[in-house]
Image: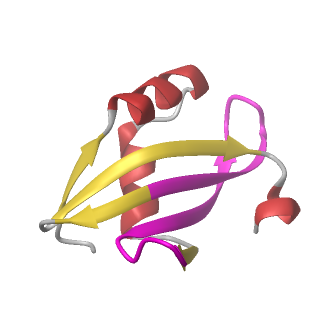
Amino acid sequence: MMDLKIKFSQHARKRMKERGISRQLVKGTVRFPDKIEKSLIDPARFLIKKLYFNEKLNKDHLLLVILEIKRNLIHIITIIDTSKISKYF
């Protein structure tokens, strides 16, 4: 997964802008995740999880990245940024 090119959907870019999440943070999450969950329905879809410190809010957050791997390309579908770490991690 580390050497594949990463492409962001329009939806993912919109969510990143709304939440102030950089491409660098998303790419780092994909390349160095804390947890990976594979979809039970679609074998090409994954949920990537990464704990990080949100400097704007001055507290720990969890970044969730939903992606698909197809044709040697990582498609970022959407991102979710939450402070509810124990609920999702």
In the rendered image, residue 89, in percent from the top left (x then y), is placed at: 76, 69
24 or 19: nearer the eye? Answer: 19
In the rendered image, residue 14, in percent from the top left (x then y), is placed at: 45, 24
Q: Is residue 56 above or below residue 69?
A: above
Q: Is residue 72 above or below residue 77?
A: below
In the rendered image, residue 71, in percent from the top left (x then y), is placed at: 12, 66
- Give yes or no for residue 45 being in the magenta stretch: yes
In the rendered image, residue 16, in percent from the top left (x then y), is placed at: 49, 31
37 or 25: nearer the eye? Answer: 37
Please identify the quadrant where the N terminus is shown.
bottom left
The number of callouts visible is 0
The residue sitting at 36% across, 49% down in the picture is 76
The residue sitting at 46% across, 68% down in the picture is 46
- Give yes or no for residue 39 being in the magenta stretch: yes
The residue sitting at 37% across, 40% down in the picture is 23
10 or 17: nearer the eye? Answer: 10
- Bounds of the magenta segment: 38-66
In the figure, is residue 18 to the left or right of 25? right
Q: Residue furthest left?
A: 71
The residue sitting at 74% across, 45% down in the picture is 82
SS assignment for the magenta stretch, majority: strand
What colouring style does the render use? Answer: secondary structure
In the figure, is residue 71 to the left or right of 25? left
